[in-house]
Amino acid sequence: AEGWEWFKDEFRRSKRKYAIGLGDYNDFTRPTMRARMLQPLAHDEGTRHQIDNMVRREQDKLLNRMAFLEGHCLGLHGGHHYWEFADGTNSDQRIATALGAPYLGWMASTRLTIQMVTPGTKMKPSIHAFNIISMHGQANARKTGGKVAWMENNLVGAWLANLYVMGHACASGSWVPHEINTIRSRGDPGYETLVPRCLMVGGFHKGYTDGWGSYVERAAFPPQPVMWGVLRLRHRNTRAGAAMNGVSRPRSEFLDVEAVNRGPGAPIIRIR
């Protein structure tokens, strides 16, 4: 709850903000248990509708807490933990509809088209595309290094984008694996450099709590802090800054990119 309130306050105070949901918004049934529950309900419509209504009532509490995101979501992914309603939709789709956001399914690409204008100059506005590959995720390794390797092997190694975002990992990380140099097919000989950024987002669920056990405890997964990912895009126009951000041909105008993980501040513990 504390981490969510921090995020909520930070999001509200930000200008020109948008969000991407990475799935697992409620701790509903896991895939294996969901299949077992739905099988006997296939011949009991009454009980199925009763359970559907219980899920909707529980989810309405979450929607009240997420209301501030309405109109500010680029899209919401589906995750592992959701409920399938009798009408063929699922609880993740219901959240997307309530927030007026596209439902992105498991994996999606998003293109941000950014028009940049330099005030006080005669430069024409330039339009830049910033491409994002995002998904709920499937990295199940216990150590962060294994999850990083999964993301680099399966996303960075197969799709060309500016930013790769993944949830589900129950760990947080932000890194640049390497540069991607593309040989020019037109114009002067040479190459263009792309700096791909990876953002692995932990999320808002706590696996260890006082007085309530979970499969996280039983499997002895490492405790993880509550975290959310942040992408900041800024218009810059200095040649030195362009070179620092991996632009192969420094120009007076470039897009400054920052991808980080955020979380609530740690309490100060006085030792004396």
Image: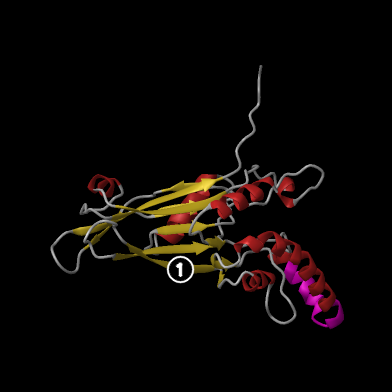
Among the 4 quarters of the image, the one containing residue 126: bottom left
Q: Secondary structure at mark 1?
A: strand
Asked if residue 247 lies left or right of residue 147, the reply is left
The crowd level at tag 1 (other Cα within 10 Å; few <14, some 14-19, many 20+) is: some
Q: Residue at x 79, y 70 (%)?
A: 37
Asked if residue 203 shows in the view, the reply is no
Observer-nearest of 243 and 182: 243
How far across and down, in percent of the image, does residue 5 sit?
66, 49
| Main secondary structure found in the magenta portion | helix
Residue visible at 52% across and 57% down? 166
Please tell me which residue lies in front, 175 or 258: 258
Question: Percent position (x, y) of residue 239?
Answer: 23, 48
- For label 1, the residue is 109
**Quadrant of the image for the C terminus?**
top right
Q: Amino acid at mark 1?
A: Ser
Instruction: Determine the image quadrant of residue 130.
Output: bottom left
Indicate yes or no whether the magenta region holds residue 168: no
Q: Position of residue 163 (x, y in %)?
A: 42, 58
Provide the residue span drawn in magenta.
Answer: 34-47
Q: Does residue 54 appear to the left or right of 28 in the view shown?
A: right
Identified at 58% across, 54% down, the residue is 12
In the rendered image, is residue 151 in sight?
yes
Tell me: 209 left or right of 72.
right
Which of the 4 image quadrants contains residue 101? bottom right
